[in-house]
């Protein structure tokens, strides 16, 4: 698991290098927009916390409105 | 402007559509416990109802020849409202990618690698698909033809091998269920897998085909895919009978019943292999579409630099948000069709209607 994690991290760093080198701020912000929530999810997964999917939340809301099978 | 530089042929586009439907078709559990032995009938009705949507997608592609769905939305609704709507589509694409990753890892874990941690399987899946997505659309779709033939060959082979246990009587009686069940079954199938073809609106600008070919390839792709689906459901029901609705993966159970001789049994590995191939293909397409959507929303010229970070998000979200395929099936049966169909069929129809009423076309079409 650690090996694959390290490989993923290395590829990600290789991907980040041209972004930082050419100072592509927009690309960096977009990358962080996905990485930060990803890290939060990873933290939750490590703690064993299962978050309700948005689709389940909407389904429960629709059910309360009577829109469900 | 299209972000992806490469172009694919119309045939590759068609084979990709077939592969895409076949990947979902093998997982026919969505309707198995709703319409039971009458599921084969529901598949036919669902596809007949879906046919106008195929032509609607074709019309939208032809009207905006060099634009994908997100660019069409931004052109029609303007940069602000267009981007807000595009974000809703992004959440939708992220969700279906995530659900398919969960499906793939679930079936791999239960059938082949029971002791491997879930995170490893998700990580491997993301790494492979990220590699494919970074290589571009041409590489992504190049083997679609081979996958279609392989999947079709295995479906036909399984029918031949299961011939001694097939009971035609298992397909009957018909029209014995309440009307609500048929409506639910048709609704679900119009959302998953047929409605999911909306993702091809993001690939269409990169396909070399004329107006007539657009309808031809889209319709042929959807029809052949639907026929494979029909064959799979027909085989599973005729083999499993009333127990069809009891299994999470009915096709896997049907394959387990194959006995060629006393020595050659347990060939369900064939099913697992083809399912993994098809699901990896489907996830790659969905992942590619998600990345293209992000790039389009933020007006990026290249998409390759964001592939891995989107993959990282998908990986962690798949672990935390979609706990297992049972939860996935429940959501797919009860809540998702209402939301999915809005984005897959109703909204593209509204787009086409607005573009027809106000005569909005892509600049290329207007200059003709």
Image (cartoon, coloured by chain):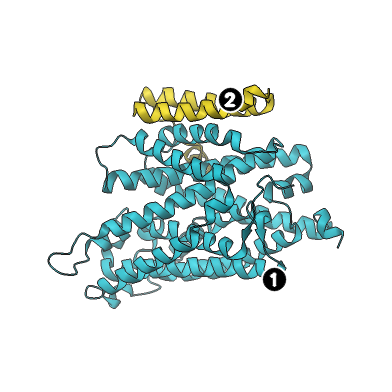
Chain colours: A yellow, B cyan
Judge whether residue B125 can be spotted in this image.
yes
Q: Chain of mark 2?
A: A
Q: Residue at x 27, y 63 (%)?
A: B254
**Which SS class for mark 1?**
helix
Same-chain check, marks 2 and 1 = no
Q: Is residue B320 left or right of residue B165?
A: right
Image x and y of residue B129, in percent: 47, 43
Image x and y of residue B298, in percent: 69, 35
Residue lying farthest left?
Answer: B262
Label at residue A17: 2
Image x and y of residue B4, in percent: 65, 47
Residue lying farthest right?
Answer: B367
Q: Residue at x 78, y 47 (%)?
A: B75
Query: Neighbour class for label 2 at 10 Å: few (<14), some, many (≥20)?
Result: few
Residue labelled with disc 1: B212
Q: Chain of mark 1?
A: B
Q: Is residue B109 left or right of residue B21?
A: left
Query: Neighbour class for label 1 at 10 Å: few (<14), some, many (≥20)?
Result: few
Task: Establish if B209 lies above or below B160.
Answer: above
């Amino acid at each position: 698991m650690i090996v694959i994690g390290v490989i993923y991290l290395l590829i990600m760093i290789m991907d980040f290098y041209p972004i930082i080198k050419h100072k592509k701020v927009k690309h960096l912000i977009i990358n962080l927009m996905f990485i930060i929530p990803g890290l939060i999810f990873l933290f939750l997964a490590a703690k064993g916390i299962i978050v309700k999917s948005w689709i389940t939340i909407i389904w429960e809301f629709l059910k309360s409105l009577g829109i469900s099978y | 402007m299209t972000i992806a530089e490469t172009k694919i042929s119309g045939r590759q586009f068609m084979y990709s559509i077939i592969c895409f439907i076949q990947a979902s078709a093998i997982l026919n559990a969505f309707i198995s416990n709703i319409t039971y032995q009458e599921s084969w009938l529901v598949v036919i009705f669902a596809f007949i109802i879906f046919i106008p949507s195929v032509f609607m997608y074709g019309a939208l592609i032809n009207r905006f020849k060099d634009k994908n769905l997100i660019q069409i939305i931004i052109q029609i609704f303007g940069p602000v409202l267009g981007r807000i709507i595009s974000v809703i589509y992004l959440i939708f694409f992220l969700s279906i990618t995530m659900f398919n990753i969960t499906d793939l890892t679930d079936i791999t874990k239960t059938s082949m690698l029971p002791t491997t941690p879930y995170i490893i399987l998700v990580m491997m899946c993301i790494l492979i698909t990220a590699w494919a997505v970074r290589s571009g659309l041409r590489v992504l779709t190049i083997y679609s033809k081979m996958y279609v033939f392989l999947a079709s060959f295995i479906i036909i082979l399984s029918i031949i091998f299961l011939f001694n246990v097939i009971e035609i009587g298992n397909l009957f009686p018909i029209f014995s269920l309440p009307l609500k069940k048929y409506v639910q079954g048709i609704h679900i199938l119009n959302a998953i897998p047929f409605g999911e073809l909306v993702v091809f609106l993001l690939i269409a600008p990169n396909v070399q085909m004329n107006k007539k070919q657009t309808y031809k390839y889209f319709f042929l792709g959807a029809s052949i895919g639907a026929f494979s689906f029909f064959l799979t459901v027909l085989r599973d029901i005729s083999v499993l009978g009333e127990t069809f609705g009891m299994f999470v993966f009915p096709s896997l159970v049907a394959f387990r019943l194959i006995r060629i001789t006393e020595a050659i049994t347990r060939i369900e590995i064939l099913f697992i292999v083809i399912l993994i191939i098809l699901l990896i293909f489907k996830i790659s397409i969905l992942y590619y579409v998600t990345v293209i959507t992000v790039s389009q929303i933020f007006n990026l010229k290249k998409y390759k630099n964001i592939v891995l970070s989107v993959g990282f998000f998908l990986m962690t979200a798949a672990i935390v948000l979609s706990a297992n395929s049972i939860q996935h099936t429940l959501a797919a049966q009860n809540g998702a069709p209402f939301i999915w169909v809005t984005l897959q069929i109703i909204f593209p129809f509204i787009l086409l209607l607005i573009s027809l009423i106000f005569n909005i076309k892509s600049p290329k079409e207007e200059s003709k």
